[in-house]
Structures are given as structure tokens and as C-alpha cells.
Image (cartoon, rainbow, N blue to C red):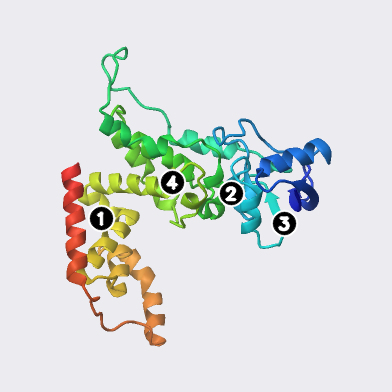
Amino acid sequence: MSTTTFAIRRQAPQGDPYWQTFALEIDPGQTVLDALNQIKWYHDGTLSFRKNCRNTICGSCAMTINGRSALACQQSVRAELANSLTPNQIAIAPLGNLPVLRDLVVDMTDFWQKLAAVDPYVSTAARQIPEREFLQSPQDRDKLNAAGNCILCGACYGACNAVEVNAAFVGPHALAKAARLVADTRDSATPERLSQYNNAESGVWGCTRCFNCNTVCPVGVAPLDRISEVKQGILATAPVASRNQDRPLRHRQVLVELVKEGGWVDERKFGLRVVGNRFRDVAGVTSIIPLGWRLVRRGKFPLRFEKSAGHAQIAAVITAVQRSSQLAR
């Protein structure tokens, strides 16, 4: 046994947060949840936190450990000491992006409301015989495995940069569930879902692609990958007219086009094609003129564009991927 210090951010209802430390004699092989239990049972019975299964199944004990979202029942004391910036100390705080009710207990209302906003249930509204069994092939079922593993612990939501700056963004947990429904062959509302998720603020385009959700997910759902799958579905089904009107769709489309053309992005064309919609959007073109003028004045506007080395191979790879996606559909 060795002595380990646990610094816990505590907060009473309507009170200000403060840090309290506890020195424990604990086996490094035990979990952070074991340490919290020891504190509550033997040191301070007022410490509040959620727990249930103690086996990485329920997701109840999600919190911020050493600055990142994690499950207390999954993280060992030894591993967290190795990750700590302060020698022999583990810092524990409530999940981010959610109001604190008491100590490590957060109010999950927004989390659940945003999940409900994506309508996370298989729709059979178009089925003529509701009593019928709707079978799937093993291949179709395998497409649901990653998103289906989500235990709704809130770790990704607590670590999400987009949620932090944009209250309208539904969050990686909701969009991971949305991806499961888009991929589900039994669902009869895929076009409506893709239209709903195609939103610059609340939907998939609100994601900043920071990768935090993939990093902290305790069960390998990889929410960012699932969000990308929904984006691909939107791009594959959106008509050309919609792409011309929808800036998020144009952003993705133009990015691929320019990389295919030159190996990397020609920034002179990027703004005009995305914001200005190839001069179709007069207001968009006007909005980027001041930026262009400042770049010219400071000598930072690129007058020439050199294609990257190996751009022909890059174009060939993109073409092959596009053809493969078309065949898969």
C-alpha cells in the first residue's frame, strides 16, 4: 500500500466550487471508484458521486479525472498516477458542459434532451404490417455495432469543444445514435433524418472535429467517426441544387475538389467557392473582400499556387475512394 492524494472539486447546491484533498492508503491496482468509495465510507460521508455497476456497463460514474472525461470504475489508480501532472496526486472533477448539482453529480437534463432531439428510435411508420418481423443480414447488423455499443455515459459530451461554445449543438452522443439509425436497414425515415442532421449549428456540421470524443470514449464508439458517416450520407443524397445553397455541404465538397486538383487546398479558390458559391452568392463574396484586401496589404495573399508533390497519386486515391463509395451504395 502507498499513500495517494486525491484532489476533489466539491460544490454544494448554489455554492461556489472548491478543492478538497484526501490522503488514502490504497493499492495502485484499485480503481478511482474504489478510492471514492473509501473516502465516502471512512473519511467524508457527504461526498456525492454517481455509481452503479462498477464494471464499465452503466456509465453512471463518468467524471473528469486528471483533466479528461473517464469512468471512475474503469481507471486504475496506477494508470492515473502515471497520467497526473502533479506527483502522487489524482485530480477529480465533475463532467464538463453540464451544471453541477453537488460535488461530482451533474444535471444530465440537457444531455437527455439533446439525445431525444435526434429521435433515437427505429421508425417503422412506413411499414404496412407492424406485427411482421424485420430481419437483417449479419452484414447489415455489423454496421450498427460501433454506435450500438454506446452506454450514454456522457464522457464525450463533457469533453466536447463544440458543446462548450455552441449550446445548440446536440453533441457527439446524440449524433452517434443518429448514425446508428441512418445505417439501420429497418428504419423508414432515413431521408428525413439526414435532412434533420444537416444543420450548421445543431447537426453534424456543428462538430469541430477536435477528436476529443474519440479519445475519451470508454467503449470504443468513436463518435467522430460516426458523425463522419452521417456527413457522408448527407453528401451522397443531397441534390446538386442543395449543395449550391448549403454552405456546410459546399465546404466539404470544395475541400475534396481542391485537394483532388492540387494535392492541397488552394486558399484563393476556397473562399470564393465556399463562401461566395462561385460568385453566385453576392453577399458571401462581399463579406470576404475586406479579408482579401487585408491579406494583399500585408503581402500575405498568395499570388501563385504550386501543386503538391505527388498530386496525381492523391487524385487517383480520391477517385478510387469515390468510386468505391458509389459502388457500396
Badge number at residue 69: 2
Separation of marks 3 and 1 at Cα, in angstroms: 54 Å
Q: Residues within 10 Å of mark 1 (few under 14, many from 20)?
A: some
Comparing labels 4 and 3, the label whose residue is closer to the camera = 3
* Left or right of 294 on screen, residue 187: left
- Secondary element under disc 4, as helix, strand or loop, is helix
Q: Earlier in the sequence, mark 3 or mark 2?
A: 2
Q: Nearer the viewer, mark 1 or mark 4?
A: 4
Question: Mark 1 or 4 closer to N-term?
Answer: 4
Give the residue type that dot 4 points to: Pro
User: What amino acid is found at the position of numbered circle 2 in the picture?
Assistant: Ser
Q: Which residue is drawn at 63% across and 31% down?
A: 52
Q: In this view, does 257 lie to the left or right of 210?
A: left
Q: Earlier in the sequence, mark 2 or mark 1?
A: 2
* In-front residue for pair 261/2: 2
The residue positioned 29% from the left and 75% from the top of the image is 268
Do the residues bearing badges 4 and 3 touch, measured as CB atoms within 8 Å? no
32 to the left or right of 2: left
Residue topped by disc 3: 89
Q: What is the spatial separation of the Cα atoms under label 1 and label 4, in whole angstroms? A: 28 Å
